[in-house]
Amino acid sequence: MSRIGAKSVAIPSGVTVEVKSGVLHVKGSKGELTYTLLPEVSVILEGSEAKVTRKDDSRDARARHGLTRMLLRNMTIGVSQGYEKKMEIIGVGYKAQIKGKSLALNLGHSHPITFDIPAGIDVAQDEKNKNIVIFRGIDKQLVGQVASDLRSLRPPEPYKGKGVRYFGEKVRRKPGKAAVSKSAA
């Protein structure tokens, strides 16, 4: 039995969960999310809790049991509280500027990069440090994907640490070349 799938999901106040013809609808103060249930699982609503059950003990049903439960949990948290990811841009001359629904980035390339922000994501910059970009949204997967896409434009390099990283991410630094003395050579 799946340990994650067996747990019930607490539905916070102000959030409504409905299952209509195999589609899960979660609505809250921040927005609404939908998810098409897989045929191996179903959702049962019991008051202020939701429980995910599977049809049988096949390998696919067991695999999707915990997945569906966690997706439901992420949806309820997203529509009530939302998710956010902070990204840090580090490097001399590296900067980001918000222009409408896109980011204008200078990341050490020969040209500036325009990074389009998808619908459902709000972008902001930290007031104190303009090199910290904050992505907010109700869909956990989308917020994480946008942050990952931004990081992939210039991942942090191990020698000087320049690049785009998650806020608080530790980058293992490598020592540079060691000088070789002439007597040893």
Image (spheres, helix red, strand yellow):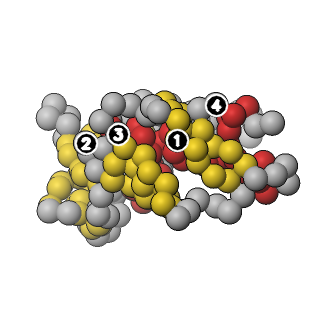
Q: Which label is found at residue 15?
A: 3
Residue 83 location (% of width, % of height): 36, 40
Place of residue 131 in the rendered image (x, y in percent of width and height, measured from the top left)? 25, 42
The quarter holding residue 85 reads top left
Residue 116 coordinates in the image, percent (x, y): 29, 66
Q: Position of residue 74 (x, y in %)?
A: 48, 42
Identify the amino acid type marked 3: Val
Front-most of residues 4 and 115: 4
- The three-letter code of the residue at mark 2 reads Ser
Does residue 61 lie above or below 44 as drawn? below
Q: Is residue 20 visible?
A: yes
CA–CA distance in space, label 1 to label 3: 13 Å
Tell me if 56 is positioned left or right of 40 in this view. Answer: right
Element carrying mark 2: loop
Q: Earlier in the sequence, mark 3 or mark 2?
A: 3
Q: Based on the displayed image, in which of its 4 quarters is residue 178 positioned?
A: top right
Mark earlier in primary sequence (1, 3): 3
Residue 26 versus residue 4 in the image, above or below:
below
The residue carrying pointer 3 sits among few (fewer than 14), some (14 to 19) or many (20 or more) residues within 10 Å by Cα, namely: some
Taking the image as shown, residue 18 lies to the left or right of residue 91, namely right
The residue indicated by pointer 1 is 45
User: Which amino acid lies under the numbered mark 1 shown in the image of this protein?
Assistant: Leu
